[in-house]
Image (cartoon, grey):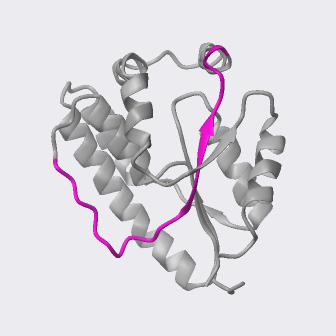
Amino acid sequence: MSDQPLFESLEGLRGVGKSTVAPLLAEARGAILVPTIPAPYHQLRRLVDQQECPDTRMCLYLSGLFAATRQIRRHLAEGVGVVVESYFARCLATHQSMGANLGITLPDDLPQPTTYRLTCSEDVRRRRLARRRKPPTRWDLLAESVVDRTEDSYAAFAMQPVDTTDRTPPQVVEAILALTPSRSPA
């Protein structure tokens, strides 16, 4: 066991529990929750989301992820663990499924998280989505229309599956804690 801090990412479709579980996992680990779309990007995100070009949207998300990676590197160098709600896998899988045609090769020196692929039964996922307070965006609807392609795209990434179907968010965190030690291996 090493003293290297953990870097963990949650991935998966809309409604599987990423945004609910991420802060709970960060708290349980004593880690920092780093947003992968930094606050300065929010206004630009709203503008880009009004367009209908998946390549443009993918570029914005990639830019946000690279900006977040600077923070992630800094925290890890300071010995502080990091949790992200999603990382490059979600950006690539989702946007490629929505029709982005960019050939993206990620740099080899990116911090590599331990990644958990949150899943749940389709009926539970749909119920969770229906309970959301905000109406779905055009991009949300497009993502829902390509769920099978997104699921197939996720297969290219190494992830530990965690089923959230019959678990409360704290139980999902417990399942993740049971999968991974508190520090990264050497």
Q: Is residue 48 above or below residue 26?
A: above
Q: Examine the structure image and report whether residue 152 is included in the region drawn in magenta.
A: no
Q: Is residue 133 above or below residue 158?
A: above
For image coordinates 65% across by 28% down, the residue present is: 120
Predominant secondary structure, magenta span: loop
* Residue 129 in sight in this render: yes
Q: Examine the structure image and report whether residue 108 is included in the region drawn in magenta.
A: yes
Residue 128 pos. (x, y %):
65, 20
For image coordinates 43% across by 41% down, the residue present is: 154
Q: Which image quadrant: the N terminus?
A: bottom right
* Residue 43 in sight in this render: no
Residue extent of the magenta highlight: 103-123
**Left-right relation of 2 to 72:** right
**Camera-side residue: 57 or 95?**
95
**Camera-side residue: 44 or 158?**
158
What is the quadrant of residue 146 in the picture?
A: top left
Residue 148 pos. (x, y %):
42, 24
Q: Which image quadrant: the C terminus?
A: bottom right
**Left-right relation of 44 to 42:** left
Residue 50 pos. (x, y %):
26, 25
Residue 40 pos. (x, y %):
38, 53
For image coordinates 69% across by 44% down, the residue present is: 21
**Camera-side residue: 132 or 183?**
183
